[in-house]
């Protein structure tokens, strides 16, 4: 499912597809801003999103075998709700 699919589904209950696109984009924009600010985004019955930073770790170049350090990076973690698969 894509953002466009979500907007098409929402357009059935909103006045137009353009309005549905605006709503979907605004929801994802607000979620992105909150996660970037270190906030946890919780969608009841679905799950939660939060950002974490990985630690520096040792790695190697697969072509040359040369050892190198992999820098810490920010990633997003999703944890599903306990109610997600219950009907």
Image (spheres, rainbow, N blue to C red):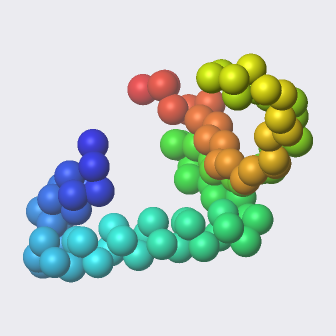
Where does the C terminus fall, quadrant-wise? top left
| Image coords of residue 60 (percent x, y) | 76, 26
Residue 70 visible, this angle: yes
Query: Which residue is located at x 27 percent, y 49 percent?
Result: 2
Q: Which residue sits at x=15%, y=66%?
A: 11
When asked about the image quadrant of residue 63, the answer is top right
Viewer-side residue, 49 vs 84: 49
Mark yes or no: residue 81 visible: no
Residue 28 quadrant: bottom left
Q: Using residue 2 as the reference point, say whether residue 31 is left or right of it.
A: right
Q: Residue at x 83, y 35 (%)?
A: 68
Q: Please, is residue 82 above or below residue 33 in the view?
A: above
Total residue callouts: 0
Q: Is residue 11 left or right of residue 74?
A: left
Nearest the viewer among 57 and 24 is 57
- The residue nearer to you, when weighing 14 against 77, is 77
Q: For the N terminus, which image quadrant? A: top left
Relative to 71, does residue 34 appear above or below in the rendering?
below
Q: Is residue 87 above or below residue 53?
A: above
Q: Is residue 26 above or below residue 10?
A: below
Q: Quadrant of residue 17?
A: bottom left
Location of residue 69 in the rendering, given as x and y in whole percent from the top left corner = 85, 38
Residue drawn at x 83%, y 28% as measured from the top left: 67
- Give percent across and percent down for residue 6: 26, 55
């Amino acid at each position: 499912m894509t953002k466009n699919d979500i907007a098409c589904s929402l357009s059935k209950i909103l006045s137009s597809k353009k309005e549905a696109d605006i709503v979907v984009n605004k929801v994802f924009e607000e979620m992105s801003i909150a996660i970037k600010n270190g906030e946890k985004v919780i969608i009841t019955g679905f799950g939660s999103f939060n950002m974490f930073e990985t630690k520096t770790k040792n790695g190697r170049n697969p072509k040359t075998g040369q050892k190198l350090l992999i820098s810490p990076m920010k990633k997003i973690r999703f944890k599903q709700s306990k109610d997600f698969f219950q009907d």
